């Protein structure tokens, strides 16, 4: 449900009219709009925003680990409508037990590497991603280094082992 503070935001209002169950919250700070989207609706919402509201540019996708809070992970999408000169931030909260969400690579091809980075560093899986594999860490790396419960000391490496 759209918070009252967003009634004057045409994009938020249009999204609520299109699917009232898609928006589960939101906030406006520093003149920036953030909408919290139900995770199961992210693919449809992004398709609607690109197709009908001209958010042609996906600026980035990133994640936040709120450990030990639950839901633990937050996936953040930064969108930009060049035609409307408007920016919009979407957030989806995911549980620790099964952190996965639909891939938006079918909407914006540029989402590919952003989603791979989030997978690699946080361990969040993107369903239907065309190439879900590590992008920054070596293929044999264990764990996901941007998780808050990842060991801060890292793994010890000895040059004598070479």
Image (cartoon, rainbow, N blue to C red):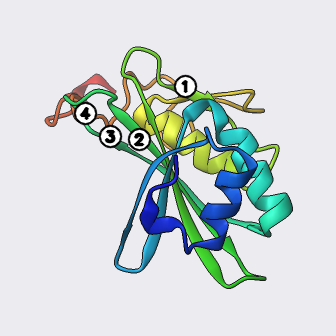
Give the label on residue 159, or none.
4
Residue at position x 55%, y 75% in the image? 8
Q: Is residue 29 left or right of residue 42?
A: left
Mark 1 element type: strand
- State which mark lies toward you, 1 or 4: 1
Q: Which residue is mark 1?
A: 100
Mark 2, Cα crowd under 10 Å, few <14 / some 14-19 / many 20+, is many
Q: Which residue is mark 3?
A: 146
Q: Earlier in the sequence, mark 1 or mark 4?
A: 1
Give the label on residue 74, or none.
2
Q: Earlier in the sequence, mark 4 or mark 2?
A: 2
- State which mark lies toward you, 4 or 2: 2
Q: Is residue 25 left or right of residue 115?
A: left
Q: Earlier in the sequence, mark 3 or mark 1?
A: 1
Residue 49 sits in quarter: bottom right
How far apart are the two marked residues, 4 and 2, measured between alpha carbons? Answer: 38 Å
How far apart are the two marked residues, 1 and 2, measured between alpha carbons? Answer: 11 Å
Q: Earlier in the sequence, mark 3 or mark 2?
A: 2
């Amino acid at each position: 449900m759209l918070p009252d503070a967003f009634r004057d935001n045409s994009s938020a209002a249009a999204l609520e009219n299109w699917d009232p169950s898609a928006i589960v919250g939101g906030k406006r700070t520093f003149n920036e709009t953030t909408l919290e989207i139900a995770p199961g609706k992210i693919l449809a919402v992004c398709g609607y925003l690109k197709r009908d509201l001209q958010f042609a540019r996906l600026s980035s996708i990133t994640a936040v680990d709120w450990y030990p809070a639950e839901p633990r992970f937050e996936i953040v999408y930064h969108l930009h409508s060049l035609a409307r000169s408007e920016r919009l931030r979407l957030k989806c909260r995911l549980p620790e037990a099964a952190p996965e969400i639909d891939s938006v690579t079918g909407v914006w091809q540029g989402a590919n590497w952003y989603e791979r980075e989030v997978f690699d560093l946080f361990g969040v899986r993107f369903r239907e991603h065309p190439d879900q594999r590590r992008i920054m860490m070596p293929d044999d790396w264990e764990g996901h280094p941007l998780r808050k419960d990842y060991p801060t000391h890292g793994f010890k490496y000895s040059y004598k082992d070479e």
